[in-house]
Amino acid sequence: SITKEVWGANSKRKSKRRRNKSSATEAVEMNSENGATASTRISAIAPSSLLENISSPPLGHPLHDKLVAFAFKVVHMKGKGSGDGRVVFARVYSGKLKAKSVVKVFSPSPTGSPTNPRTERIASLLEIAGGRFDNLDDGSCESGEVCALVGLKTVVTGDTIVLANETKGGTSKKGKNSSQPEQIGSICLAGVASPKPVLTVRLEAASSDDEKKLSDALALLAVEDPSLEVKESETATLVSGLGELHIEVIVDRLRREFGIDVAIGAPSVAYRETIISEIETNNGGLLNYDRTVGGTRLQAAIHLLLEPNVEKAMDEEGSGCLALRDNVVLLHDRVREYLNVDDDMEEDDLVESDDLIRALVEGIKGSLRRGYLGPFPVANVKCHVLDVDAERGVQGLREQPGALRAAAAYAISNVLSSDSGTNCTVLEPRMRVEVTIPEHMVGNVLSDLNNRRGAVGDVIIGDDMEASPDQVKATVTSDVPLVEILGYANSLRSVTGGEGTFSAEYKGHSVCEFKK
C-alpha cells in the first residue's frame, strides 16, 4: 500500500489527518512485528505558508529509518580517492550517508539472496555539479539524493549499502531462509540484471610488456560494465560483450584511456543448445553407472527428468525470442529422504552445506556445459532429480561423492543423446536492427536484409513534402541473426554509397538450423 500525506489548511482536516496518521502508525507497528514488507511513502509538499508551526515529516521510508543506499554505477577516475580510483555512484533510499562512515556492503547472489556482508569505510563524497567532481570531506547525502562515494574498494554495480552500526551480527538459522542475514531493519535490494554476452573475441597485447597492463585494464572495465565478461588463460584473453559495437568501444577505451594497443581475433557468436520437450533417463527409470577408475569402483544409479525452462522475450509484433536462463536443478522428496537432507532447505543452501549434494549438482551442471549437437553450452533446462540409489547405500556415497558426480554427468550425456538428439536444438542470438537510409534505397536494403535471414518489420518513410526524393529518409526495422550482421557497417556503406546508418540491439535467442 502507498501512504499519501497531503498537508491542508483546514484545521479540522489537519486534526483528522493526525488521527489517521496515528492509526496508520499502529498498523505499521503491527505489520513491522509480523515481518511485513515495507511499503513506499510519498510526501506532497504544500506552500510554506501552510506549514508554519508544523514539523516536517521525516525523510525516507516510514517503515525503515535506517540507511539503505543502492550502488547503480561504478567508474574509475584518476586522482580521486585511493587505490584504483574507484568512484561509486549511489542513490540513498532511506536514512543519511556521511563521509567517514563505516558501512556494510551486500551483493545479491544469482538466487536472489544476499551474500555475506563486507565492511568498508567511505573516505569522502564528491560534489556532482556540471561535470565537476570536487572532494567534500564532510559531505552528506540524505534520502532521495544521489551521491558519489570515494574509498569503497569492493563495491560493484547493484550492491546495497547500509551503516555498519545499524546491523547486528548473528548466526543465520538453518532452513529455507538461512541465507538471509539477521539485521535490524536491513534490506538487500534486488541488484541490476545484466544481459548475457552474445559475442566473444580474442584480444592480444601488441607487446609482451603490455600483457599485465591489459589484464589490469580489463579487470577495471569489467567492474564498470557488468555486461562485459573477461576470461583469461595462459594462452588467450577472451572478451565477451553484447555485440560488435560494444567490443569496439572496449577496444577504443583500452587505447585511449590506458594506452594499450591490442590485436583483435575473429568474433565468435554465443550459440546455445536447449531441449524442446521433456526427456527422462532409461525411459522413466534409474540409470545405473558402474565403472572402475584407478582401481576404485564408482557405482550409483540416478533417475533424471529434463524439461524446458523457457521464457519468451516478446516484441511489439508478437513474434518471440527465448530469453536465456540459467539451468536449474531440483531435488525431489524421494532423493532428499534417501540422502538424509533437510526437506525445507533450498537446493542452493544444500550445495553450500552438503558435500554429496554439491557433487550431484556439479555433475549435472558440469555435463550441461557441452550439448549433444555441438560444442555449445546447454541453457534453459530444468533438471528434476527424481531418485537416487547405490549398492553401498548413502554411507557409501558419502565416502565416495565422486561416484554420484560421475553418475549424474553420465546420465545427462545419456539423456541428451537419446533418440539421436531429436529433442535438442541450437539457439542463435538475434538482433533488432534499425537502418536509416534515403527513400530510393529501401529496395536494395530490404533485399540485403532478406539475404541475411532477416525478418523485416516496419518500413517508415519520411513525410517531408518540401524535400527532394534524395533527401527523404526511410527507417527499416528487422530482426536479424547476429552472425549475419558481423561487419554489416561495411556492407551497408557499399549498398547505400555511404548514406546509410544503422543500430543493433540484442533481442534474444531463437531456434536455428544446425547440422551435426
Image: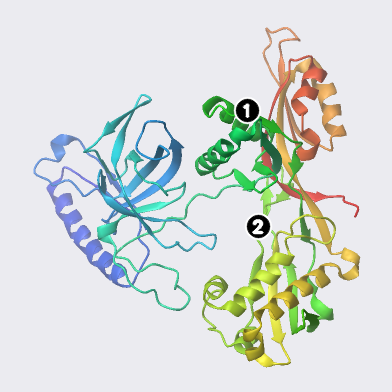
Identify which amino acid the numbered label 1 is placed on.
Asp
Residue pointed to by mark 2? 325
Residue pointed to by mark 1? 261
Return the x and y of residue 296 as percentages of the image width and height.
75, 83
SS of the residue under disc 1: loop
Identify which amino acid the numbered label 2 is placed on.
Arg
Say which quadrant the N terminus sits in. bottom left
Residue at the spot 27% in from the left edge and 56% down from the top edge: 66
Residue at the spot 29% in from the left edge and 42% down from the top edge: 123
SS of the residue under disc 2: loop
Residue 316 visible (yes or no): no
Residue at the spot 79% in from the left edge and 82% down from the top edge: 292
Return the x and y of residue 448 as percentages of the image width and height.
85, 28
Label 2 vs 1, first from the N-terminus: 1
Nearer to me, 343 or 407: 407
Return the x and y of residue 308 as percentages of the image width and height.
73, 64
- Which residue in the rendered view is the most extreme toward the bottom? 392
Residue 71 visible (yes or no): yes
Q: Is residue 306 left or right of residue 22?
A: right
